[in-house]
Image: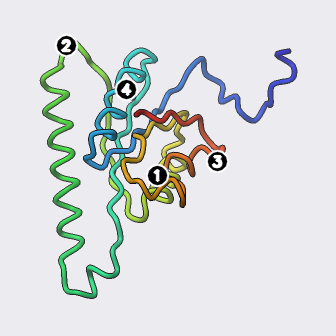
Amino acid sequence: MVDKLPPSFERGTDGPKVIVAGLDGSESSWRATAYAAGLARRQKALLVVVYIQPVLAAGAALGAPVADTTGEVAEELMTEMREAAERRRGVFDVRWEFHTFRGDPYNGLARAADELKADAVVVGASEQAGHRFIGSVAVRLVKAGRWPVTVVP
């Protein structure tokens, strides 16, 4: 049965070395990040927390300082991550990095996972009702089939 596994999936390790977690500040994304941190700790993997700065053409057209606002969100999330890691130091040590990419959530996370050579991607379940019809970021990541994806409720 082992001979029938596709060789392209094997990356030459006994577990994930890089776990990407998408964080946008929602409750489900914080749960996903916490779950990913636990995986990273147990696997001795690097946790890469990724925030996708949305590109809002409409906001820019109306004169709203979109880049400043999303940059502030990224700074706040990174500060919260740093504080949470500090509170758990010694009890729950995990190596982690925080990265920001620009774009829509799906393409940004896909690009981040590819560029960071992610072995796994962890995201929170969508909290928006409309995603039942057009597809959530999580569903689109799963359908891409390029990484194992865990969706945390």
Mark 4 and mark 1 lie on one chain; the one further toward the N terminus is: 4
Q: Which mark, by number, is residue 35?
A: 4
Residue drawn at point x = 36 percent, y = 20 percent: 38
Question: Which marked residue is nearer to the observer: mark 1 or mark 2?
Answer: 1
User: How far apart in space, not on screen, are marks 2 and 4 (Cα)?
Assistant: 18 Å
Q: Which mark, by number, is residue 109?
A: 1
Mark 3 and mark 2 lie on one chain; the one further toward the N terminus is: 2
- Quarter of the image with the C terminus is top left
Q: x, y (%) of residue 20? A: 44, 38
Q: x, y (%) of residue 50? A: 36, 47
For label 2, the residue is: 90
Mark 4 crowd level (few <14, some 14–19, many ≥20, 10 Å Cα): some
Mark 2 crowd level (few <14, some 14–19, many ≥20, 10 Å Cα): few
Mark 2 and mark 4 lie on one chain; the one further toward the N terminus is: 4
Specify the amino acid type for callout 4. Tyr
| 50 left or right, relative to 70 | right
Specify the amino acid type for callout 1. Leu
Specify the amino acid type for callout 3. Lys
